[in-house]
Amino acid sequence: MVGKPTLKLVSDRATPEPAVLPPPVLAVSLQGMRFDEKPVLGHIDLRLNSGETVALTGPSGVGKTTLMRIIAGLEDRFEGHVRRPDRIAMVFQEPTLMPWRTVADNLRIPLKLSSQAIDIALEEVGLEGRGSAFPNQLSLGQQRRLSLARAFAGDPDLLLLDEPFVSLDAELADEMMTLFETLRAKRNVATLLVTHAKSEAERLATRSLHLSGQPATLKPAS
Ligand SMILES: Nc1ncnc2c1ncn2[C@@H]1O[C@H](COP(=O)(O)OP(=O)(O)OP(=O)(O)O)[C@@H](O)[C@H]1O
């Protein structure tokens, strides 16, 4: 009895898998932004992928913080569209801690962390055993470390850093940057970092963008 012929597909070269890129963590498409009729931001397209750190530079007053606030969902006076992840953390120049709450509560209340997770977060930034202290009992450097701990402890997909290392002496700035690098290495977070310091951008960022003009637009930094 003759069996049914079988069809065998033979290929002499490996067929490449189609490249499927994951969607960006953040997609910003702005047509413009005005404050009281004054145009501040112009046409801006910005995409951030998981795991990359993008530095955002530009002269004072150009609109960097305004762009960060739009991205964070804190500003809605703009034309355009922002697709952002649910888990976003922000770190500002000054540590925004609740002074009337303990160190542990500063992590527990906004992030709803367990005691064990709080201990781990504090240990990561060298503040183990300081959970019952109040923020004003910490040094400035420790307060900044707590701010970074809080930002990372929520396991954000997007981290917005607005000049977090400014006005620190060189040694403390270096310590904070090293800490940031250590925390970042354990996660796949996308980071947008506003900075005036070229050395900071060169050290921490995978690429740099420059905001300039009036209304301001984005270009790759030279
Ligand atoms: N709430 C507001 N109402 C009106 N104008 C504002 C408001 N916030 C910012 N501006 C104006 O928008 C412009 C951009 O301000 P923004 O704080 O975004 O600049 P920046 O680039 O972050 O500056 P810097 O580097 O000095 O922090 C400035 O001219 C500022 O005066």
Image: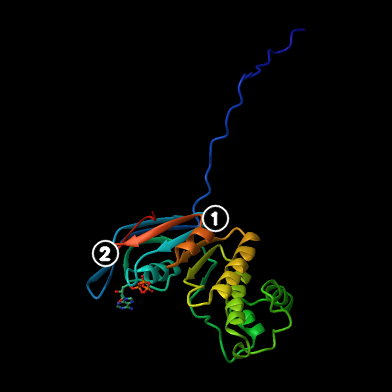
81 relative position to 146: left or right? left
Distance from label 2 to label 1 (Cα)?
Answer: 29 Å
The color scheme shown is: rainbow
Q: Mark 2 or mark 1: which comes first in sequence?
A: 1
Location of residue 139 in the rendering, given as x and y in whole percent from the top left corner: 61, 85
The quarter of the picture where residue 2 lies is top right
Question: Relative to 90, is 74 on the left or the right?
Answer: left
Q: Are marks 2 and 1 in contact (CB under 8 Å)?
A: no
In terms of depth relative to the viewer, which is nearer, 34 or 86? 34
What's the residue at 34%, 68% (across, down)?
A: 59
Secondary structure type for disc 2: loop
For this orientation, the residue located farthest to the top is 1
| Residue 215 place in picture, x, y as percent | 26, 64
Q: Rate crowding at label 1 as few (under 14), some (14 to 19) or many (20 or more) other CA atoms within 10 Å.
A: some
Amino acid type, residue under disc 2 in the picture: Pro
Disc 1 residue type?
Answer: Ser
**What residue is drawn where x is 45% and y is 69%?**
72
Outermost residue toward the bottom in this view: 100
Splitting the image into four quadrants, where does ligand 1 fall? Answer: bottom left
**Image-based side of 37 in relation to 180, left or right:** left
Q: Residues within 10 Å of mark 2 (few under 14, many from 20)?
A: some
Question: Can you tell which mark lies on residue 50?
Answer: 1
Is residue 155 something one can see in this rendering? no
Q: Which mark is residue 215?
A: 2
In this rendered view, identify the residue nearer to me: 150 or 77. 150
Residue 43, compared with residue 62, is above or below; it is above
Residue 111 x/y as whole percent: 61, 76
Furthest residue toward right: 1
Q: Residue 31, percent across and down?
A: 30, 60
* Quarter of the figure with residue 60: bottom left
Query: From what the image shows, is residue 11 above or below residue 178?
Result: above
